[in-house]
Image (cartoon, rainbow, N blue to C red):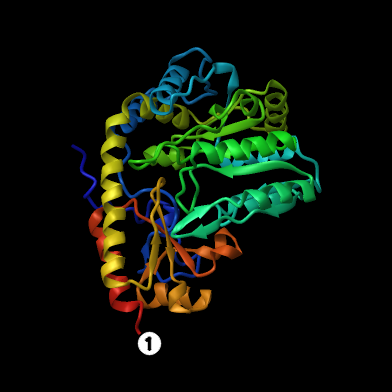
């Protein structure tokens, strides 16, 4: 039994979530529930593996063998958790998923060519497209009866009208919490194949799936799409080790993989951090039970938020997540501007959430809350919201 109730002081550790309020112009005493990392200790086996490796005291250039223990741990996790048989030759290791996405944009499209995203979505998608001087095309998700859906007709039309070359797909979706169904994935795959659109699937939240839902790796939809996509995975969200920077990218298409590897080398990235490799292997080898218990704990936090809002603040609607530990909150019934909403939450409630507009203009009226904190922290956040949000 793991102790997720323990409140850990993360101040003065360089934590982006806890130490940079002043930098972002946020009150220092605001309760931080924004950045998508967790306020829980990583599995003890991860820390122990890191200590053992650091005690060696020689930290030279380091890598892992394609057929060694690292890939064995990684492939066993993908097989056991997702029913996916991955092969060593598909693997490209990178410092992070966003970096991998940027490399795919650079390697597989030319300046001025179109890349499609589905807002409201993880904001680095848009930044990566625009900063690499590609044309940004948006197929906004549609909120129906408290659940987001894809407008497939618009998706296809936008692709054809803009000659889209690349689609960055968020699965499970951050911030709206959708775990996509097989029929939805099949429709996306068919449209992309028919229009020669390569798919970059960000599946970093794939281990955070709640009962009644199943994550399907995009490459398992069918054999054709498996050769027309790259799957971005990482242990970072799952085990709270984002700061150790290690992601595992699977690209079955040899030509696409070669182009992306060449782009990575052109950026001067040769090896992954020692700590990233060690922590990834340890997490996938020994972290299963820890994750299983954590999923139950975080779901209880999310259920608490849902009940609390229904009973105490019915004006605020929660889009119940099927996956991820992120909660998408709809404040539109308050009829506040986005600036007023931010100021009310920060200055009156003392809560630091993610501004919904950061995920696209269709996020106006929404905020993202990170539910991966001790229950006492989440409960306090809801009490603060109830007490102060509706003050005139």
Outermost top residue: 67
Quarter of the image with the N terminus is top left
Q: Is residue 338 left or right of residue 344?
A: right
Residue depicted at x 55% and y 41% = 184
Q: Seen from this angle, which residue lies furthest left?
A: 1
Residue 264: image quadrant is top right
Depicted 347 relative to depicted 249: above or below: below
x, y percent for residue 187: 60, 39
> Residue at 44% across / 39% down in the picture?
236
In this rendering, does residue 359 appear at all? Answer: yes
Residue 34 at what x, y percent from top left?
43, 58
Q: Quadrant of the C terminus?
A: bottom left
Give the SS element for disc 1: loop
Above or below: residue 178 compared with residue 73: below
Q: Decide which of 217, 98 is in the foreground and name it.
A: 217
Q: Which residue is mark 1?
A: 392
**Residue 16 left/right relative to 310:** right
* 357 shown above or below 218: below
Whether residue 202 can be seen here: no
In x, y percent, where is residue 45?
30, 29
In the rendered image, residue 182, in percent from the top left (x then y), is placed at 51, 36
User: Label 1 neighbourhood size at 10 Å, few (<14), some (14-19), many (20+)?
Assistant: few
Q: Tell me if residue 301 comes above or below residue 55 in the rendering.
A: below
* In front of the other: 81 or 190: 190
Which residue is painted at 46% across and 48% down in the image? 178
Image point (37%, 68%), residue name: 351
- Count the labels in the image: 1
Q: Is residue 120 left or right of residue 298?
A: right
């Amino acid at each position: 039994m793991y102790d997720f109730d323990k409140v850990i002081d993360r101040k003065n550790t360089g934590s982006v979530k806890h130490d940079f309020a002043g930098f972002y112009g946020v009150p220092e005493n605001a309760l931080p529930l924004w950045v998508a990392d967790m306020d829980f200790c990583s599995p003890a086996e991860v820390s122990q593996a890191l200590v053992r490796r650091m005690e060696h005291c020689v930290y030279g250039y380091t890598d892992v063998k394609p057929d060694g223990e690292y890939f064995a741990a990684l492939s066993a996790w993908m097989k056991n958790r997702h029913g996916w048989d991955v092969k060593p030759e598909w693997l490209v290791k990178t410092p992070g998923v966003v970096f991998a996405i940027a490399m795919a944009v650079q390697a597989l499209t030319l300046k001025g060519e179109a890349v499609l995203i589905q807002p409201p979505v993880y904001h680095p998608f848009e930044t990566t497209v625009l900063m690499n001087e590609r044309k940004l095309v948006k197929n906004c998700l549609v909120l129906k009866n408290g659940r987001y859906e894809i407008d497939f007709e618009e998706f296809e039309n936008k692709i054809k009208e803009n000659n889209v070359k690349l689609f960055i797909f968020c699965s499970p979706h951050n911030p709206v919490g959708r775990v996509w169904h097989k029929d939805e994935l099949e429709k996306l795959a068919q449209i992309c194949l028919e229009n020669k659109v390569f798919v970059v699937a960000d599946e970093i939240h794939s281990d955070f799936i709640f009962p009644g839902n199943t994550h399907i790796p995009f490459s398992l939809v069918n054999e054709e799409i498996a050769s027309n996509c790259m799957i971005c995975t990482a242990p970072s969200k799952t085990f709270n080790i984002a700061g150790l920077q290690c992601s595992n990218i699977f690209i079955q298409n040899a030509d696409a993989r070669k182009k992306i590897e060449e782009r990575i080398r052109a950026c001067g990235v040769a090896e992954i951090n020692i700590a990233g490799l060690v922590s990834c292997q340890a997490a996938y080898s020994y972290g299963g039970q820890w994750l299983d218990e954590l999923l139950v704990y975080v779901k209880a936090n999310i259920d608490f938020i849902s009940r609390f809002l229904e009973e105490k603040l019915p004006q605020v609607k929660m889009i119940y997540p099927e996956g991820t530990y992120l909660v998408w909150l709809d404040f539109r019934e308050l009829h506040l501007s986005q600036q007023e909403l931010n100021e009310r939450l920060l200055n009156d409630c003392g809560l630091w959430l993610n501004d919904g507009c950061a995920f696209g203009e269709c996020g106006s009226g929404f905020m993202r809350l990170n539910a991966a904190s001790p229950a006492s922290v989440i409960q306090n956040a809801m009490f603060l919201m109830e007490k102060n949000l509706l003050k005139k």
